[in-house]
Image: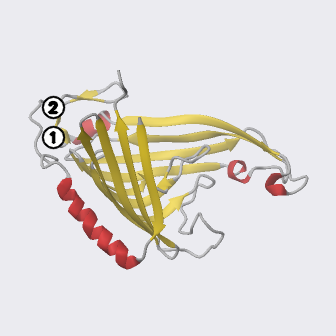
Amino acid sequence: MKHSIVSLFPGDIRTGRLFSISTVAAALLLPTFAFAESPAAIKPLSSNLGQTCKQNAYGVDNALDALRCGSVHGSLRSLYYSTKNAYFVRNNNQDTASYGDNILFQTAPYYGISAGVGGIYQQQWRSPGAGRGVTELATNQNGFSEAWLRWQYQDFRFTAGDQRIDIPFMSDYDWPITPILFRAVDMHWGDKTDFVHATKIYRYKPWRSDKFLATSAYSAIKEETNGAWAVGAGRSKQAGDMTLTGQLWYESYDDYVNIFYSEAHSQWKAVP
């Protein structure tokens, strides 16, 4: 059995500062062993390219192994989209089929530092004809996608550059072919349920374009903004047969809106 509580409401800057302080305080709730050395022996690193390298608490032993034991991630997808009287306009019929996606090469960590670089590609299967192209799919895309540097030690990581972000209201989960990306600095301490997180976003790449933009996706205003920032914390607790999880976020979209967001879940084990 699972129960969820979600709340969303705007907040002002003063409230946001208070929340920022409380988020830092929430770090004290994380386990005290978050940065402790692991007593278990560290296993060799195996990449998905068939290479195996020795590693220590900070990564592989040399820079060559960082490249040799790097990994490749990517996917290929195709999407066909057809409309009739699109946007409630009579005889505005659209018909577009495109394919593509993204690929990423990520080095193995060396002294805790790793790097990722990737590319995107989107191409129509055929031209739908003048006026019949679906805007998001009819635009061909090619170029660099992710390009970032990361420092990580155990459950703490700091990433700077063009990257994927996965926090409430700022994520890459909604995209047809090429992913949404963010030019940002991102810090995470913890795991998926017990964490402190902070992000500053300068620009974003929508899935309909291969360019990084400083405008808002929520309006047609073309004036550039100062981006967005967010801080959040999450915590989980086991109480008998019940698991409690929750998270709090404050997000500020500069020149647009400030958001408070909280989410809580309670889950009971199934009765045998």
The scheme the figure's colours follow is secondary structure
Q: Amino acid at mark 1?
A: Ala
The residue indicated by pointer 2 is 42
Q: Say the numbered circle drawn on residue 83.
A: none
Query: Which residue is farthest bottom?
Result: 14
Residue at 35% in and 58% down: 248
Residue 20: give x, y in percent of width and height: 30, 68
User: Is the residue under label 1 in contact with that under label 2 (CB below 8 Å)?
Assistant: yes
In-image side of 177 versus 260 (left or right) = right
Q: Residues within 10 Å of mark 2 (few under 14, many from 20)?
A: few
In-image side of 182 versus 208 (left or right) = left
Q: Residue 47 versus residue 184: which sits nearer the camera?
A: 184
Residue 267: give x, y in percent of width and height: 36, 38
The residue indicated by pointer 1 is 57
Residue at 18% in and 31% down: 54
Q: Quadrant of residue 77?
A: top right
